[in-house]
Amino acid sequence: MKKIIFSLSLILSLFHIPLFATVQTVIIQNPSSWLKLSPDKPPLKQISAEIFIQILKEEKLLELYTKNNAGRYQLVQSYPICNYSGGLGPKTLTGDFKSPEGFYHVSLKQLKPNSRYYRAINLGFPNEFDKFKGYSGNSLMIHGECKSIGCYAMTNRYMDEIYQYAKNAFYHGQHEIKINIYPFRMTPQNMGRYKNNDNYPFWKQLQPAYEYFAKNGIPAGVRVIDGQYIVNAKPKNP
């Protein structure tokens, strides 16, 4: 140690710089470098804008989009899903432990700030399609705590952000939030991989909505007609 200090003193003396003055200068110029143990969490983007949510099961992703001034939706956050249960395919029966697939709408009353699983957003299962099919189940959520029995579970930090986006969108005038849930990215290649799956006819009903949003940046209009999802259908009696 003495040899190191002596060598440093010798080098500094060649440039006529006092050792202790140099150390003091470093400390004064960077007083906060010793205090910042971790960077601050970045602020959320466009927190008051209208939002749209797309869930992809196989990829385990929740994509959150906000509406821009041109009326189109752009991806602002992509959250990894911590857990979901039951594998691919729609939920059909109470106790089957499956997480829903399809098209859901959320209103302000479906936000649960004091959920048993931190915070939660009730998907509104069963929807009109599910009821027509006779599917059963209730309290299917997006929630925190990373535990799932038929729900989409997130970490608490991510759930907090998603909840803030939803709450602020409602408080700034959005009437409902569309949540589209797909088994996977519904590209022609992925549809080809699953063409022999028992759920393929159901997934074919979902694919047009996925493609419409990918092409236009606007969520598709979806109706249930005779127990089928129909994308951008016009009402029979406009």
Image (cartoon, rainbow, N blue to C red):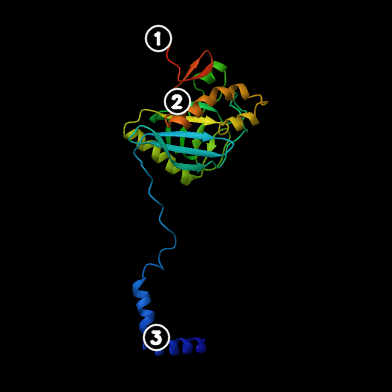
Most foreground residue, 188 or 76? 188
Question: Which residue does the numbered mark 2 point to in the structure image?
Answer: 220
> Disc 1 on helix, strand or loop?
loop
Q: Quadrant of residue 40?
A: bottom left
Answer with mark 3 or mark 2, whichever residue precedes in sequence: 3
Nearer the viewer's eye, disc 3 or disc 2? Answer: 2
At label 2, the amino acid type is Ala
Query: Where 225 sits versus 59, above or below?
Result: above
- The residue lying toward the viewer, choosing from 32 and 29, is 29
- The residue sitting at 41% across, 37% down in the picture is 74
* Callout 1 touching callout 2 (CB < 8 Å): no
Q: Secondary structure at mark 3?
A: helix
Q: Which residue is mark 3?
A: 19
Q: Position of residue 151 (x, y in %)?
A: 54, 34
Q: Nearer the viewer, residue 238 or 151?
A: 238
Taking the spot 37% from the left edge, 67% from the top edge, the residue there is: 32
